[in-house]
Amino acid sequence: MSYPSPTLAALLSFIFPGLGQIYAGETRKGLIWAVPMLLFIVGALFLVLGGSAAITSLITAQKSLALVVLDIAFFLYHVAAMIDAYDIARRERTLGYSRARGAPVFLAILVAITIVIHGLPAVYGLDYYNFASGFQGHSDVIPQASFAAITPGPQTPMPSFSNLPDESIPGETSTATVSQQPGVTGAPGASATPKGSGGPVATVKPKVCPPPPDVSGWTTADGRQPAADGRLNILLVGGDSRSDTGLDTNSLRTDSMLLLSVDIADCKAALFSFPRNMQEVDPTSGSRYPDWFYIPLEDGSHYPGMLNALWRDAASSPAQYPGSDGIGSECQTQFDCERGWRALTASIQQMAGVSVDGVIAVNLKGFVGLINNLGTQCPAAGQRLAVDDASGNPPTCYPGIWLDVPQPLVDLPGPCDYDPTQHCAYYNSQQQQMPINIQPGCYFMDPEYTLAYARSRHQDSDYQRERRQQYVLQSVRKQLDPLSLLPHIPGLLDAVQQNLFMTFTSNDFPYLAQIASRVDAERLYQEDFAPAHLSPLGSMSGMQSFVQNIFSQPEPEPQPPQQQNQCPPH
């Protein structure tokens, strides 16, 4: 007569609680043990069949904590089911005067594996709960829009980047030769691949736009209804602070300001860049902007300085700007200074002619932390790298993203502080000088070089920098791999929490996630308000009308993806 194996019984209940009990002869008990697992499977199927709306509904702080508690309870149930099946089989074998050698060790191994299986989600869940609950929401810093509705009409097309002879679009590959340069490692003499080469060309996938999510129930903490008109507008801001806490003793300059606008129903998205040096023309400013342009303030007056200084001036001037009641000039050293964000969003939405639904701002260290936690790649021999590594023993794998550089990017006007024999003017996120000399081609760039590519401006202009920033954001969106992101979730959440300001709370995250999934990075409208692009619009109302009606213009067509291309499709 054969007796059940305790080892096999424990293994079966590890695979599916209750199977080990049934194998050991306790069928009724096994069915009872299987009930929670069956309920879990039914719940998982319900979520999967419910689509992205059901899955993303779980990413609030409260629900993430509930899932952690459920995971811990399921862990205890899982272990108890294994131990019970093991004990039943062990007792049956004992009655037959037989012992299973090594079974306790095997059971201990199964328990250890179960701890890992349930422990990682619990740790990630707690990290996410701490991250999500840390954002209290500041949607009240966005004032009500005061502009009048503009009737849609014939639009004056904004000049294309390619129509300007001295400018080009990041992402268009040059055929120039890549040479070995200071600060850039790679293969000397390697040439970039021109468009149209590199093997067979695949066809562009047709656009698929699923039914839009229901956002009618979306209400922020202060009672607003984002995207009530079917369009979500988020102000994306990059600040120049290098502090680990958002700001330090120095105030913030908003050097990168982009308005992301999403047409939810039609799966269309646009990025509008507002240059840092936007300024009303006066005899002393030397502004290159048209004489009709000005920066409107909430009270109807005009801001005389450059746009990137508005946040700082508002934060330090409680008597002149509303918000941050009871807080004086020290507000300028606080990343969540209501007065600064209120002034900036009021001006942006007045210039754009659309209501700003939310703000997401990050400083320099936050950007580097984001790129550092997107995943690690190991470029092959001969592929061009741009990495900030002075160890003399560089690694073979790096965090970063692929970027296609169309023109040389050189930031070498003066001697370095740390090495007078080298030339550099760019300061990285650690306030250290680093030489920037990147020739045209396809590069894998580490976090610091990605930041440098997005921020460097000594060679060309603020307007070219804006276009590089749009290209970097587009590249991050296209190269984001959720699977490779999983091991980096704790570091990503930590980097974001320390260096991010947003007006959203975790209750808004499910709606944001559903809308973000509808953004097609290959068909992104990319516009900027450089002087040459702004002048044809003719007036402030023309500027507003252009933003309001951007989605009535032809949608950009993506480049066909090319085989054997080191860089992702443009």
Image: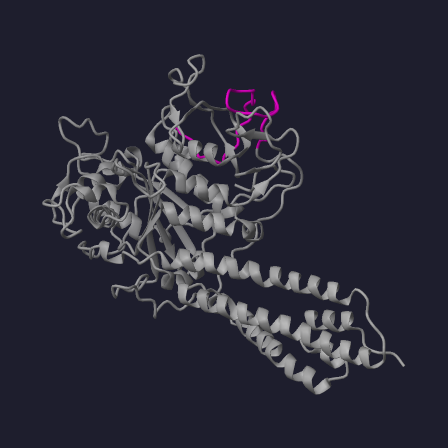
Q: Where in the figure is residue 237, as x and y percent of width and height?
A: 33, 44
Please report the residue visible at 81 percent of the width from the left and 70 percent of the height from the top: 100
Q: Is residue 169 magenta?
A: yes
Can residue 327 be seen in the rendering of this structure? yes
State whether the magenta stretch is mostly helix, strand or loop: loop
Q: Where in the figure is residue 530, as x and y percent of width and height?
A: 30, 35
Comparing 233 with 17, the one in front is: 17
As drawn, 488 above or below 458:
below
- The range drawn in magenta is 165-194
Residue 329 occupies quadrant: top left
Q: Quadrant of the N terminus?
A: bottom right
The furthest residue to the right: 1
The furthest residue to the top: 421
* Count of labels in the image: 0
Please report the residue visible at 27 percent of the width from the left and 57 percent of the height from the top: 139
Q: Is residue 312 magenta?
A: no
The furthest residue to the bottom: 28
Query: Horizontal placement of 191 versus 263: left or right?
Result: right
Can residue 166 be seen in the rendering of this structure? no
As drawn, 359 above or below 330:
below
Query: Horizontal placement of 456 versus 384: left or right?
Result: left
Residue 11 occupies quadrant: bottom right
Q: Where in the figure is residue 341, as x and y percent of width and height?
A: 24, 48
Residue 442 occupies quadrant: top right
